[in-house]
Image (tube, rainbow, N blue to C red):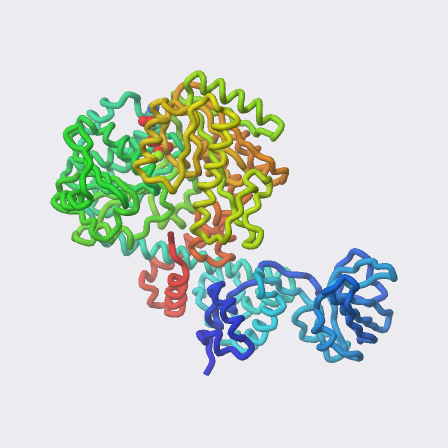
Amino acid sequence: MLDLSTKIEEVARIGTAYQKKLKKFGIKTVQDLLFYFPSRYDDFSDIIPIKKVKVGYTVCVQGKILQIESTRTFKKFMNITEIIVEDETGAIKALWFNQPYLAKTLKEDDFICLAGKVSLGKDGMYLNNPAYERISEAVENQNLTHTGRIVPVYAETRGLTSRWLRFIIKPLLVNFYHKIPEILPEEILKKYKFLPIKKAIWQAHFPDSFDYADAAKSRFSFEELFLLQLSVLKEKAKLIQNKAPACLMNTALMKEFTKSLSFELTDSQKQCSWQILKDLEKITPMSRLLEGDVGSGKTVVATMAALNTAKCGYQVAFMAPTEILANQHFKEVTRLLESFNVRIGFLTAKEGRIFKDKETYKTSKQSLLEDLKNGQIDILIGTHSLIQKGVDFKNLALVIVDEQHRFGVEQRKNLTHNNALFAHLLSMTATPIPRTLALTIYGDLDLSLIKEMPKNRKKVKTLIVEPKDRSSAYEFIRKEAQEGKGIFVICPKIEARDKKQGTKDKEGMYGSFVPKNYNLGSLVLQDVKAVKEEYEKLSNEVFPDLRITMLHGKMKSSEKEKIMQDFKKGEVDILVSTSVVEVGVDIPRATVMMIEGAERFGLAQLHQFRGRVGRSDAQSYCFLFTTSPDHLNRKRLKALVASNSGFELAQKDLEIRGPGQVYGTQQWGLPDIAMQGLSNIFLVEKTRAAAKELLEKDPGLKMYPLLKERLKNFEQRIHFE
Ligand code: ADP
Ligand code: MG
């Protein structure tokens, strides 16, 4: 017996080539296919008499085929199929290009329904490439699929057309729709007046009206987000059953620390550290997100938590997304804690270091790991290598992660696998995100906000630089450099657009570079190539008088580290780099951030770049070089010029690019309908409240076995990053 879990291989009309294509979309079963929703609809519902057809309109007509003809044009390879269709009111021609098989499928005297755009040719009106469907006779109320109704249009990729999907999905709907179980609880269906599942699934694919299509859509976007919320909340419920080590707040120590700083903490910083230190006193594991714009001073807050934890006799893990940042955190934390007698380790894939008695030593990774296990290290700073096998803490109590979109319970468990106790988590981000959304996509964290910037900050002046102004921008840069200021130049990645054409850059900026054959890995190389070319151009042609160096991801970390230090010390004027300097690097003497191909970066990312300058009391500048006339690109760059607030920019980014791009959720494998739902904050809130209510009543979902099953299925399909 076939059921919803039937594999697509067993569905009659799906051949092996199509099976492969479907699997690329994650479609493996009948159920997956039925839940593969259209991204939009074409309205062909109004069938009109041929006499009423007008040029420029999209219309739907039906009638009998009078004549059919297939020809080759003099321009070779072009096949044209032409038919004439007649109803009681008139006749019209329809044309298709390069679909020779049509002449074989359609015959004279067949009845046909056509839908498409009306064009004007030499000898009158014709339907250009219309959707078509054979019908039994020109009578009303036929059960149509591709024409004569509101027709679903699916997200298409090579070889998977909407026509084919309709052809496959419709019979499956007929055969299976009554087997689709209702998973939403009765109360929810009632409360929100949702269509019941069977009706909703029909109406999602073949709606009777646009109202029905909308109703189906709101039900399914609710459903997907509801599942996401259930999953997040259940994870949290599981988490808080664990016990964490309680570290009492050492008020005297914290006072001593703040006194040791060369500045005063902002009110926000004080509030946030208080919230964190209070959480650490509990035996329930903390899960807290510290959110603050670039340069708002999150590291100091995190360092206070680390110090307090270390002095309680526990260990701290501090993770950064890149080696450069890990390095910088290590430098910053060792500097801040210099006189507090804590032992700080540094670990990346390549090296180990240790800081104790006010000195930093190189050490083998092995001996570092040994020390860690014996409790000889209080704070371990590093990259992802911290969650690898072989890294065993003696008594880890606090994990600090910087700019990782999501740090799952599993990863957290990996860190503490040796211990009975579970570590507290402090996650930091400069991406401003509305609260409910944060709760949803960061995995239900409590939120601490740094709302204000340190007082000594000056606004960075931001300008869009047109090609004609390039040389005056260069002159300006030369002057800054001559005054001893540091200049960043960021180069965008060259995107490989087409294998055959290589990577021909639209603006021709790096057009000379054509890789033989590219794969994802070589994108990094293209990155490097862009930097090398820019570096050569600047040092040979533009600024032969200045000291220029380059930085990219393919360099050894010791090399990168040395370059950053030289730049920081003022031994380099201009640093040409890939986006590796993106987050968090602190070079106070840098006053100019120059970004090539600025339109290729997201707003949040550009804001991050800009945050690299303006870290002293000198006036700083951000130059956005662009040659793109594209309206949306312009709009984004103008938004950056107009606003210095990360929160405002993120909001704009969200509107322009959608939440998947902005928050990195596109890698999770969430269905489109859920992704769209994430940009609707009311829906996010509604689903969260509903999920919470249900779990309070029935934490194990015992009363809802079908929902539980679906949730399991859902969790297998998404993979939080
Ligand atoms: P981010 O939030 O981007 O991680 P950082 O923690 O790197 O910001 O801080 C940026 C710089 O500002 C650092 O050099 C830090 O020492 C300094 N800083 C932090 N807090 C303050 C403050 N309250 N007043 C002045 N400078 C501060
Ligand atoms: Mg930072």
Asked where in the image residue 318 lies, by quadrant, the reply is: top left
- What residue sits 80% from the left and 73% below the top? 69
Asked whether residue 717 is in view, the answer is yes
Q: Nearer the viewer, residue 48 or 77?
A: 77
Drawn side of residue 12 relative to residue 418, left or right: right
Total marks placed: 0
Q: Quadrant of the N terminus?
A: bottom left
Farthest top residue in view: 483
- What residue sits 36% from the left and 40% below the top? 555
- What residue sits 48% from the left and 67% below the top? 23
Q: x%, y% of residue 271?
A: 31, 31
Q: Nearer the viewer, residue 367 or 246?
A: 367
Q: x%, y% of residue 434?
A: 44, 42
Q: Is residue 198 above or below residue 270?
A: below
Q: Nearer the viewer, residue 258 or 565?
A: 565
Q: x%, y% of residue 409?
A: 29, 53
Asked whether residue 46 is in view, the answer is no
Drawn side of residue 563 relative to residue 131, left or right: left
Q: Nearer the viewer, residue 11 or 221?
A: 11
Q: Is residue 355 above or below residue 114?
A: above
Q: Is residue 484 above or below residue 391?
A: above
Q: x%, y% of residue 27?
A: 48, 67
Quarter of the render that holds ligand 1: top left
Farthest bottom residue in view: 1
Drawn side of residue 698 relative to residue 140, left or right: left
Asked where in the image residue 140 lies, by quadrant, the reply is: bottom right
Q: Is residue 89 above or below residue 493?
A: below
